[in-house]
């Protein structure tokens, strides 16, 4: 079980009613935060993991299949950062049960705003469709040191947690 902690803007867009007291996560990486952000290449729903600050994105026009695509994007990113398939499968299996909640961490929201700016910048700087690859953006951001996790790299934090 995980909780997607959505901003009010995203909850309104998706028509989501959050639970008052979400159950604790069973996934090693914990819960994820989500927000709707505009970019010149199209609006995105970005997700940021609360423990590692890994981030994945889904084009808003694909929000009809949000949970399925979220699972696929997270699994893809975990593969790109070098985790073994059985570890990925174990983590993603916790995504079978998802509840929606309100945001609860200003630190994660601040990081989410930073990532939103980076997604927007990557879209603006793109000179070809290859440059607009969401997978490339997710991987680049997974390699960026972040102050809320003591300037560690999200990919390394995730590998350490999931390989225990």
Image (tube, rainbow, N blue to C red):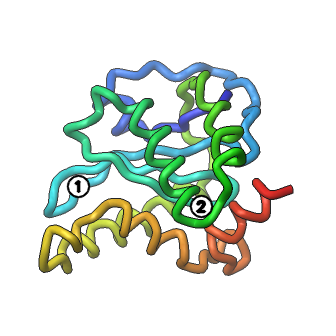
Q: Position of residue 117 (x, y in %)?
A: 35, 69
Residue identified by numbered label 1: 38
Secondary structure beneath label 1: loop
Q: Are marks 1 and 2 in contact (CB under 8 Å)?
A: no
Residue identified by numbered label 2: 53
Secondary structure beneath label 2: loop
Considering depth in this image, is 112 or 155 the residue closer to the camera?
155
Q: Quadrant of residue 124?
A: bottom left
Tell me what residue is drawn at x 62 percent, y 68 percent.
154
Q: Is residue 22 above or below residue 6?
A: above
Q: Position of residue 26 (x, y in %)?
A: 76, 33
Question: Residue 130 vs residue 114: left or right?
Answer: left
Question: 10 Å neighbourhood of mark 1: few (<14), some, or many (≥20)?
Answer: some
Q: Is residue 16 above or below residue 85?
A: above
Question: Residue 89 vs residue 74: left or right?
Answer: right
Tell me what residue is drawn at x 73 percent, y 33 percent.
25
């Amino acid at each position: 079980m995980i909780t997607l902690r959505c901003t009010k803007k995203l909850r309104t867009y998706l028509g989501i009613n959050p639970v008052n007291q979400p159950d604790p996560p069973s996934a090693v990486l914990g819960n994820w935060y989500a927000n709707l952000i505009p970019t010149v290449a199209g609006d995105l729903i970005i997700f940021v993991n609360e423990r590692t600050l890994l981030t994945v994105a889904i084009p808003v026009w694909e929000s009809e299949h949000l949970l399925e695509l979220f699972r696929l994007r997270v699994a893809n990113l975990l593969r790109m950062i070098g985790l073994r398939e059985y570890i990925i499968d174990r983590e993603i299996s916790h995504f079978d049960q998802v509840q929606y909640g309100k945001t609860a961490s200003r630190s994660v929201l601040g990081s989410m705003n930073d990532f939103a700016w980076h997604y927007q910048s990557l879209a603006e700087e793109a000179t070809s469709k290859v440059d607009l690859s969401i997978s490339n953006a997710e991987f680049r951001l997974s390699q960026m040191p972040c102050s809320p996790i003591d300037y560690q790299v999200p990919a390394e934090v995730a590998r350490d947690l999931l390989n225990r």
